[in-house]
Amino acid sequence: MRIIRGSLLTFTADPFLRSEAECLRYEADGVVVVEDGKILAAGDAGPTLAALPAEARDRAEAVRHSDALIVPGFIDGHLHYGQTEIIGAYGLQLLDWLSTYTFPAERAFADPAHAADVAGAFLDELLHNGTTTCCAFCTVFPQSVDALFAEAGRRGVRLLAGKVCMDRNAPEWLRDTPQQAYDDSKALIAKHHGKGRAEYVITPRFAPTSSSEQLEALGALAEEFPDLAVQSHISENRDEVAWVRELFPECRDYADVYDAFGLLRPRAVYGHGVHLNEREIALFHERGAAVVHCPTSNLFLGSGCFNVEAAKAPARPLRLGLGTDVGGGTSFSMLQTMNEAYKVARLNGVSLSAARAFYLATRGSAESLGLAHTIGSIEPGLEADLAVLDLRATPLLERRLRRAESPQDILFALMILGDDRAVRAVYSGGELVHERRVVGSK
């Protein structure tokens, strides 16, 4: 048993649809009791500790985090581990960026040693930034999938990932075929899905790089495995949207392409959605599919400004998560991703509150992935994934927080001024997987 004490903040519901006061739970002196990788109890320290048997309190490992805020581990809903080494490459428009940087970088993942090396670095970056779960694209090579799941297993983190499938509009050395996509994916499901904290995700790269035959094969796979997650991209860039219209003239719009092949359903998560029309948003709502907002990538590649408020309109709210989209995205930090999400919202004429931003990075992403019963909140019975955020991480953050008057103000300062330096400790499945020296300590 482990007892982790400090200020505690989590969400119980969606603050886009209910008042923030109803959704946000904050304890100035809180405690999380962890046993066998799960949360046994959480709440106000006094009564929570008093409710534990004395024998349990005596044998527990107790850790106290002063000047810190304990939040659920961040959940990155959309990113590419094969693009780790091209993060920050000189920005071009999306389709040019893919051909200039992405495809050549992903070719190297045919080498298992390279795949393993990058997989380890990728996961360590996530943990250093407080991210305990991610939904990641591998590459077309099955060995890249094996490497990422192996490294995640060594670290005990929760991973959702899949082999990228694409059989056209890409270099020949990165293509598979409809049958190969089906066979490789099915074999990888058997090999990795449900082993430890691993989940396999059916992964067409995006509609332009998959023929109708390949999407049909992946739709058949999705029908065979109705509980599996699905991931891809949608409406990131206006040129891409126009291209999809040319490639699939029989479909009404981009969302209709995926829907036609049975790939729009609960646990289907699509990166970006910047240029979705009203019919598409309503269809996502009806199908229970989700969009992952990727603000740093959308700004870096000039793709556009996703409208969070419109997406969460109460009449037909989207399931919505938050993602870094590394390497089109420019940071592994979910704090910096929230920072950019706030700025994108301002460009749309609205203010994204800190509570809503942190919800998207935790419980919102868990709900998008169909995992809110497992991760995303600090509640008894859930997996003990926690990030401890240091309120004294930098002199500027410490000075700013002297004026903080509410939990929401603390959150806002963290998401605007924070980065990996603000992540003091990370627990994944109840185990300490990252720790940063506290400023001023010996």
Image (cartoon, rainbow, N blue to C red):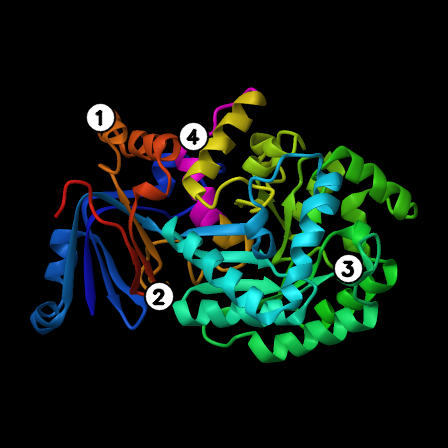
In the image, what residue type sits under mark 3? Met
Residues under numbered marks 1 and 2 in contact, where contact means CB atoms less than 8 Å apart: no
Q: Residues within 10 Å of mark 3 (few under 14, many from 20)?
A: many
Res. 272 in view: yes
Query: In the image, residue 169 lies at what x, y percent?
Result: 83, 52
Query: In the image, residue 234 lies at what x, y percent?
Result: 71, 45
Q: Which residue is more in the foreground, 402 or 7?
A: 402
Q: Mark 2 or mark 3, which is nearer the start of the sequence?
A: 3
**Which residue is under mark 4?**
353
Q: Residues within 10 Å of mark 4 (few under 14, many from 20)?
A: some
Q: Is residue 296 left or right of residue 416?
A: right
Q: Mark 4 or mark 3, which is nearer the start of the sequence?
A: 3
Q: Which residue is more in the foreground, 214 or 47?
A: 214
Relative to 220, say whether 70 is above or below: above
Badge 1 marks a residue whose secondary structure is helix
Q: Is residue 435 left or right of residue 244?
A: left
Query: In the image, residue 82 lies at what x, y percent?
Result: 60, 56
Q: Which residues are magenta?
A: 349-364
Tell me the mark number nearer the camera, choosing from 1 and 4: 1
**Which residue is under mark 1?**
399
In the image, what residue type sits under mark 2? Gly
**Gap between marks 3 and 2 measured at Cα:** 34 Å
Badge 4 marks a residue whose secondary structure is loop
Tell me the mark number nearer the camera, choosing from 3 and 2: 3
Q: Residues within 10 Å of mark 1 (few under 14, many from 20)?
A: few
**Which residue is under mark 2?**
429
In the image, what residue type sits under mark 1? Arg
**Gap between marks 1 and 2 measured at Cα:** 33 Å
Q: What is the chief secondary structure element of the magenta stretch? A: helix
**Gap between marks 4 and 2 measured at Cα:** 29 Å
In the image, what residue type sits under mark 4? Ser
